[in-house]
Image (tube, grey):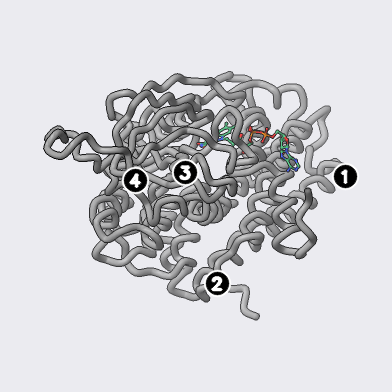
Amino acid sequence: MDFGFTPEEEKLRQEVRDFLKKEVTPGLIAEVAEYSGGAGPIFGRRLIQKLGARGWLCPTWPKEYGGINSSEMVGFIIRDEMTYAGAPVSLVGATMAGPTILRFGSDELKKEFLPRLARGEIDMALGYTEPQAGSDLAALELRAEDKSEAPMMEKGEVQAEDKGDYFLLNGQKMFNTHAHFVEYHWLGARTDPNNPKRHRGISLMIVDLKSPGITIRNMTTMAGWKTNEVFYDNVKVPKKNLVGEKNRGFYYIMTALDFERMFPVGGFQRIFDEVVEYVKETKRDGKPLSDDPIIRQKLAEMAIELEAASLLYYQLAYMLDKSEVPNYQSSMQKMFATETAHRLADVATQIIGPRGQLQTGSKWAPLNGEAELHYRWGFIETVYAGTSEIMRNIIALRGLALPMLG
Ligand SMILES: Cc1cc2nc3c(=O)[nH]c(=O)nc-3n(C[C@H](O)[C@H](O)[C@H](O)COP(=O)(O)OP(=O)(O)OC[C@H]3O[C@@H](n4cnc5c(N)ncnc54)[C@H](O)[C@@H]3O)c2cc1C
C-alpha cells in the first residue's frame, strides 16, 4: 500500500498553499470565526469566488457544472489546506448538498444550482434538526403538503397562480447554522405523515430563504457564533425544487450526512504547530517549556492522534476515488477528528496555563486565544453532524454488524 501523495498532488498542494497565504487575511479569519466556519458576507464570499474561478471550490465536479473533473483526493487536499490556512470550509453547498444533487437531483436542479455553487455565488444551510428531532432525525415534523395532490376545486375554478405545482410548508427547524446569511435552505420535510415507517415519509427540497413566510431567529452558541431557529408559515416551494424522489429524502439526507462527516484536519494541525512553536519559544520559571517531560509526553500523544485523524480523512478520499461509498468510515473519521480537536484544545490550555483561558482579542492571550476558543468550538463539533454517541452507534451497527437495538 502506498501512503504517499503523487508529485502532481504535492504540486497542487503547494499551489493552493501559496494562493491561500496571499488571500487569507486577519479580517477573513475573524469573519470565519464569526460565521461559524462558513463563508461570511464580505471576505469569505470574495475568497470562495476566487477559489471557484480556479475550479478549486468543487474540483471533482464535471466541467459543465464548474468543476475540473479532478479526483476526490485533490478535493480533500484543497479542503485540508483551506482549514490549515483558516479559510472558510464549512460550505454546505459545495461539500454536502452539491455532491448529493449530483447523485440524485434532476437535470433541471443540477443546471440551476451546481454552477452557481461551484462559482461561490450562493450557499445553503442545513435544515434537518427540529426541537423534537435531532439524533432521531426520522421524527421530523415540518410539514410539506403537496398541493398537486390536494383536492382541486371544481373544473375551471383553479386560480391561475394556484396550479398546485408547489409544496406548502409549515413548522419549525432548530440549530440551522448559516441560515441567516446564505441564500438557500437544504430542507428535510414530512410529505407523508401517514406512513408508519417514519423515515419513508420525508422529502428533501431546496428552499429560497427569502420566500415569504420564513422567519429566522438567532441563537448564540457557546463558541460565540450564531445558529438559528427557522419558522415556516405557509411557505410555497416549487415542486421542481424537490431533490430526487418524493418520500425518499431520508436516504438522500443520510448520503449528505456522510459527506458532512469528512473533517479536514488541517485547522487542528495548525493549532498544534502553533502550540509546538510556543513550547519551543517559551520559558517558565527560567526553564524552557520544551524541557518539561509531561509537556513533551502530551505533545507526542497529540501528534499521533492528529496523524491518525489525517489518515482516516485521506482514507475517505481513497475510497471515493475507488467508487466505494464511505459510511461508517465517515462516522469513524468525524468522531475521532472532532474528539482529537477537543483534546488538543484541552492540552493547549493546560500547557499555556492560566493565560490559556484568555479569549481572542486579549493582548495577554498567547496564540491569540485560539486554545480557549477551540476548547469551546471543539465541543460543539462533537455534537453537530451527529453526536459522538451516534457515531459510535453507527460504527457498531454498520461497521461491526452488531444487531440493531430496540
Ligand atoms: C452549534 C450547533 C450547530 C448545529 N447546526 C446544525 C445545522 O446547521 N443544521 C441542522 O439540521 N442541525 C444542526 N445542529 C443540530 C445537531 O445535529 C443536533 O444537535 C445533534 O444531532 C443532536 O441532536 P439533539 O440536539 O436533538 O440532541 P438529542 O438527539 O436529544 O441527544 C441528546 C443526547 O443524547 C444522546 N443520544 C441520543 N440518542 C442516542 C442513542 N440512540 N444512543 C446513545 N446516545 C444517544 C446524544 O448523543 C446526546 O448526548 C447543530 C447543533 C449545534 C449544537
Q: Is mark 2 within 8 Å of ligand 1?
A: no
State the CA–CA distance, disc 2 to disc 4.
28 Å
Q: Amino acid at mark 3?
A: Asp
Indicate which disc residue 324 carries.
Answer: 2
Q: Nearer the viewer, residue 46 or 357?
A: 46
**Callout in the foreground (1, 4):** 4
Q: Please, which residue is most extreme toward the front here?
A: 154
327 over 212 or under it: above or below: below
**Image quadrant in which the N terminus is located:** bottom right
- Which of the two discs, 2 and 4, sits closer to the camera? 2
Q: Mark 2 packing: few (<14 Cα in 10 Å), some, or many (20+)?
A: few
Distance between mark 4 and mark 3 Cα atoms: 38 Å
Judged from the image, the secondary structure of the residue bearing numbered disc 4 is: helix
Do residues under tags 3 and 1 come within 8 Å of each other at their CB atoms?
no
Q: Are marks 1 and 4 in contact (CB under 8 Å)?
A: no
Q: Residue at x 34, y 69 (%)?
A: 69
